[in-house]
Image (tube, helix red, strand yellow):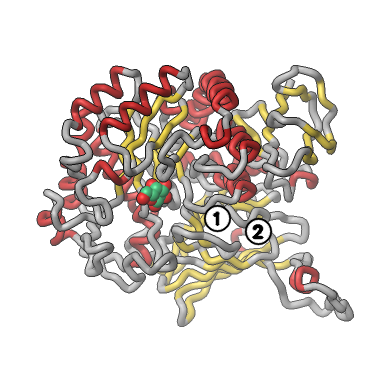
Amino acid sequence: MKKITYGTPEKYTPAVFCENFSYTETEITYPVDQIKFKCNQRGCVLTLPLGSEEQIYGLGLQLKTFNLRGKKLIIRPNADPVAATGDSHAPVPFFVSTAGYGIYVDTARYAEFYFGSSKFLTEKEEPVGKKEIASSTEQLYAAKNTGDSNISIQIPAARGVDIYVIEGKNITDVVAQYNMLAGGGCSVPEWGLSAIYRCDGRYTQERVLEAAQKLREDEIPVGIIGLEPGWHSRAYSCSYVWDKEMYPEPQKLVDGLRNLDYHVNLWEHAFVHPESPIYKELVPYSGDYEVWNGCVPDLSMEGAREIFASYHKKLVDMGIDGFKLDECDSSDYTGSWSFPNLAEFPSGMDGEQYHSLFGTLYMQTILKALGDNPTFSDVRNAGALSSSYPFVLYSDLYDHRDFIRGCATAGFGGVLWTPEVRHADTKEEFVRRLQSNVFSVQCLINAWYCEVFPWLAHDCKQEVKELLELREKLKPMLKKAFDKYKETGIPPVRALVSDYSDDAETYNIDDQYIFCDDLIVAPIIAGENSREVYLPAGQWRDYFTKKPVESGRFTVSTDSIPVYEKM
Ligand code: GAL
């Protein structure tokens, strides 16, 4: 791995705020002399070579796109990333190539990555597609391989940047080193890997306890109960104070849940309501724009962190051991609710930088409140170098295919993703969604708007019970994978191309993923009774029946989820 500095890097970058940052230079063979750097009126630009066969992946969690070769993306935090533009809950300026390298660009800017969409021809080359008349828009705009080309990266506003060139035997090896740069993967307690049930936000204390008891009676193995906005006296923005009417005896509730052997997770976001006990103290540490009438504390500042964390410690002392840090991917695109990029924060950061770092700073602050208490929590924004934080990303979007793609792409960027289950239109859909959720890093039923257990509408309590029992069985394997993540940086869930970077058949597989080293999971979407599966060369067997399965491509049809185990 080699760090190269071009021009004068900015003061605020992800590496500056990465608490566990650890860089050791090693020899590399990458042609560093071919990287070009210049400043222009929009910031600075890096240009790098791109070989004709290279495939590119990464830029954090991408729900709408996978192989980035031939694409142009701008990495921008967005609560509603509906298109393949680079917008994401967790955009990360790090990409990897099948040619055995990856580049981390240490910036908190909405950088633009141009992965060889086109190029200038050399004198010897003929222009391609001279006389191709398309008959559909898909055909018209389909990415064309332009042969040897280049990658251009525009970093707005900056007059310089540090990059880290990482080499490895395959993508997994490169990603692992990138994660080690951030201090390795996160440490996760085994209980965190049990299913989470998030109750309807309108539930009272009594209803929560009733639901928790019912789950125990029905022997549905859930390990964590999550409370949604209703627990706050003010929720948008947040007060972090228990609502007296809905939650008159919060300690009794937490104790009651803990007696039933649950861990407890609280929803919140970091826009602080004027009635919150920490509001006045936080205002001097806040940006110059409000969100939902709340102040936006600059959590890069020690003072703000201290106020926020020591208040939250009181919740931790009550027995809370998880938080859901919502809305910190706050962008300006969903109902225009968040602070603009031109906002100014007291540390000197602008809104663009703060948007990029918000999730990371928020996770750090909450971890400070949790102290030595282990957690496996949730967050809606993460950024570069955040692999060592035990938080999982989720979304308000709900396309099942995109959710499965997220399992494959998150592993390219040191972030974790859950394809959460909420409601479903049919029993089949509920079961199909839960199947993929069980084989993911966090098994999350987010019933925040469901008055009753969402499976009751489809009469599939038995299926839910069996799937969550399966989840319980998977926990030791997943825990081992997380321990390995922590030690080596190898993500517990990753795309096939990550391990099999030499196998061109895997280059565009975004609907299967590797789970805990030895399994390949190929979820089925509701409405599709069968699907095509690809297993790379090797000895495989069906995870459930233990019958050997030939590698290569084949079609499978099952009510269960296709999972294959390496022998
Ligand atoms: C959303 C979040 C949902 C739920 C809801 C409650 O922002 O993504 O999962 O928590 O808020 O208001």
The picture places residue 207, in percent across and down from the top left corner, at 31, 32
Of the image marks 1 and 2, the number of the one nearer the N terminus: 1
Query: Residue at position x 26%, y 33% from top?
Result: 205
Query: Residue at position x 76%, y 43% from top?
Result: 502
Identify the residue position indicated by label 1 in the image. Answer: 59
Q: What amino acid does circle 2 point to?
A: Leu
Camera-side residue of 238 and 288? 238
The vertical placement of 150 against 247, above or below, is below
C-alpha gap between disc 1 and disc 2 = 9 Å
Determine contact: label 1, label 2, CB under 8 Å: yes
Mark 1 Cα-neighbour bin, 10 Å: few <14, some 14–19, many ≥20: many
Mark 2 Cα-neighbour bin, 10 Å: few <14, some 14–19, many ≥20: many
Q: Quadrant of residue 46?
A: bottom right
Considering every residue shown, the one lying at the far right of the view is 131
Query: Residue at position x 57%, y 23% from top?
Result: 462
Which image quarter is the C terminus in? top right
The circle on residue 68 is 2
Q: Quadrant of residue 209?
A: top left
Q: What amino acid does circle 1 point to?
A: Leu
Q: Quadrant of residue 473?
A: top right
Give the SS element for disc 2. loop
What is the total number of numbered labels drawn onto the structure image? 2
